[in-house]
Image (cartoon, helix red, strand yellow):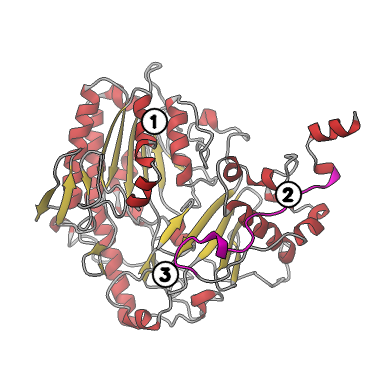
Amino acid sequence: MKFAGPLTAAVLGAVARASCAGNSKPNFIFIMTDDQDQQLGSLEYMPSVKKHVKKEGGYPKFISQGLNDNYLPVWLQDAGYNTYYTGKLMNAYGTRTYQNPAPRVLLDPNTYVYNDAIFTLDNQPFERFTGEYSTDLIAKRSLEFLKQGIDAKKPFFLGVAPIAPHSELTDTFREPVPADRHQDFFPDAQVPRNKNFNPAQAGSASYFKQLPRLDDSQVQYLDNFQRRRVQALQAVDELVNGIFQALEAHPDVLANTYIIYTADNGFHLGQHRLPAGKTCGIEEDVNVPFLVRGPGVAKNKALSFPSSHTDLAPTFLKLAGIPLRNDFDGLPIPVRAVDQTPEAIKTEHVSIEFWGKGIIEGTAFGNLRAGGYFDQNTYKTLRIVSDQHELAYTVWCNGDHELYNMKRDLYQSFNLYGKQPQGSPYNISQLTKRLDTLVLTLKNCKGDSCRHPWRMIFPSGKVKSLQDALDSTYDSFFASQPCVSFDECTLGYLPELEGPASPNPYQGYLARDADILDEHWI
């Protein structure tokens, strides 16, 4: 299993304090939960997060590519920051593989065991904490690091990554485990019964076409799973409250600190007949909370423009006044009002890719495991988010396609691909060719081609968005483009089995670069 590229079609919940203490570099507290949804309402069970933030404001691969000495904490340290980190770092970061680890981080094989965590601190031998609750240990260490950061009187970055509400993982994936003090909370909590929850009609692409409806016992199991998720998040909510209590004792530090709260990916529970899990390109899996409080961020204001986790490092560097790197695939998220200019906001695209088998979480879905429904789960998904367009387009490794107008169909119930519904605002065939070409551009992008993919298709810069590209002038150009395709459903990224590598750039007379035109006319 492998995720690549951005994981969120992000809606920025901007929510912060709007003052700045002097001209000193700001501090950062970055809190990332594991598998927390945006679409299923988990934030509604977290009063401290809402109070303080929302209303206020593959390790071996990592090492082999030399990234352990060339990533965010190193860049911040080079700029004069003290950096601290506690909680989960990444998968496969374990007792046999860690080297030069960040402070007090969880280690496999017990990363996702709530009451038997293994931690390492800097280069010291790892230590096991049997019988102690993982999130509480992370909360305690985060406060210790926060005190060190404040006492040092230097700018600091504190990363906090609790595992909640990730499934408990021992021999298999099971429901999350809340702290004992929270295990009776929210007895009536259940999965929201939205339009796409265990629908009567099967889906229209890949394994969604064959999935059986969940039976009553499986639905009850998912409701209990949801209760366990929001119960497990209560310790995270207490962690957040503890951090703010510590910051409020130092008002000058609080006024100069950005607090960012987000998750690594979302989660599904019964949507489209799915079991518990997170390995799909549906909105429940890719849309996550993103809340910010800090200097210059408008209080209790929600903004909606696309962003993804590739934009986080550029955002931190921008806020810290550190020059951006040319190799960044993302752009700074304009969280401050002063940065929310038309040219600063990322164009419109979020790219999601997955290779391998889909993961079933929980113990009530033996029929789905036996059926092998999720063995072919390799796909590429594109989300478009703009004032004019809200779209989701997916190409599956078996050749199936999906296209949804998210303005009209938030729950992705009516697949537009290959259809032309009466009253549709789009010529579906022409729209599909544009979206497919954009996926083809993004699938192998690096740096600027990820940040500005339309520029790679139209080098002149005349076309900057899907709206521009929908001009009928370009119909024949897009019709001539190769299509995104897969030769087979692979378990990993094998570019030689993924069809054409890139689109053909537009060479029309009116689209040539001004410098080229001048040269030809001299």
Residue topped by disc 3: 357
- Residue 335 rendering spot, x and y as whole percentages: 48, 35
Residue 505: give its label.
2
Mark 1 residue crowding within 10 angstroms, few (<14) / some (14–19) / many (20+): some
Secondary structure state at the residue bearing disc 1: helix
- Residue 405 rendering spot, x and y as whole percentages: 61, 62
Please name the residue shown 72% across and 71% down the image.
420
Above or below, comparing residue 405 to residue 234 in the picture: below
Q: In which quadrant will I find the C terminus?
A: top right
> What's under tag 3, amino acid-wise?
Lys
> What's under tag 1, amino acid-wise?
Trp
Residue 57 visible within the image: no
Classified by dominant secondary structure, the portion drawn in magenta counts as loop
Mark 2 residue crowding within 10 angstroms, few (<14) / some (14–19) / many (20+): some
Q: In which quadrant will I find the N terminus?
A: bottom left
User: Do the CB atoms of the residues marked 1 and 2 lie less than 8 Å apart?
Assistant: no
Please name the residue shown 16% across and 53% down the image.
117
Please state if 178 lies on the left or on the right of 282 as rendered: left
| Count of residue discs | 3
- Which span of residues is magenta-colored? 490-509
Residue 3 highlighted magenta (yes or no): no
> Which tag, 3 or 1, sits closer to the chain's start?
1
CA–CA distance between discs 3 and 1?
A: 35 Å
User: Do the CB atoms of the residues marked 3 and 1 lie less than 8 Å apart?
Assistant: no
Residue topped by disc 1: 75
Secondary structure state at the residue bearing disc 2: loop
CA–CA distance between discs 1 and 2?
A: 35 Å
